[in-house]
Image (tube, rainbow, N blue to C red):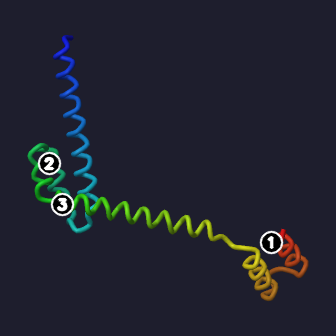
Amino acid sequence: MSFWEAVWLIVISFAFIAYLMAMFMIIVDLFRDSSVSGVMKAVWLVLLIVVPLVTALVYLAVRGDGMAERTAEHHRDARQAQDEYVRSVARGSGPAEQIAEGKRMLDAGAITATEFDALKAKALA
């Protein structure tokens, strides 16, 4: 293999990988968008399979502006869900909340006084 054949192989490989990434992003964006009906999603997908390059260029021209907005919205929602989860886990229940819950259980008759004392000791330890 000559030097120029190797360079050509690298260029073609780069173009093919870029093409596959663009197709993947188009398909992800297509299925992420809830405003597009299922029939239109199917039409876009069939066109991507039958006439891939032309369809990809048309998709990017027609719906390309919204791709960034939908991606940003998806990342924002994921970040918000992660932050809510972290807050819920970090919040936990402190000793006062554990003792108050134990007192409610004692008053309801779910636990005995000795169990409440053990729960209180464990919460304060």
Q: From the viewer's perspective, is residue 93 above or below residue 31?
A: below
SS for tag 3?
Answer: helix
Q: Which amino acid does label 1 sit on?
A: Ala
Q: In the orientation shown, which residue stands out farthest toward the top?
A: 1
Label 2 to label 3: alpha-carbon separation: 14 Å
Q: Residue 16 carries which label?
A: none
SS for tag 1?
Answer: helix
Q: In the orientation shown, which residue stands out farthest toward the bottom?
A: 107
The residue where tag 1 is placed is 123
Q: Which mark is residue 65?
A: 3
Q: From the viewer's perspective, is residue 79 above or below residue 12?
A: below
Q: What residue type is labelled 2?
A: Ala
Comes first in the chain, label 3 or label 1 = 3
Label 3 to label 1: alpha-carbon separation: 55 Å
33 with respect to 83 (left or right): left
| Residue 21: x %, y % from top left | 25, 43
| Residue 71: x %, y % from top left | 30, 59
Q: Which of marks 2 and 1 is in front?
A: 1
Residue 86 falls in which quadrant of the image?
bottom right
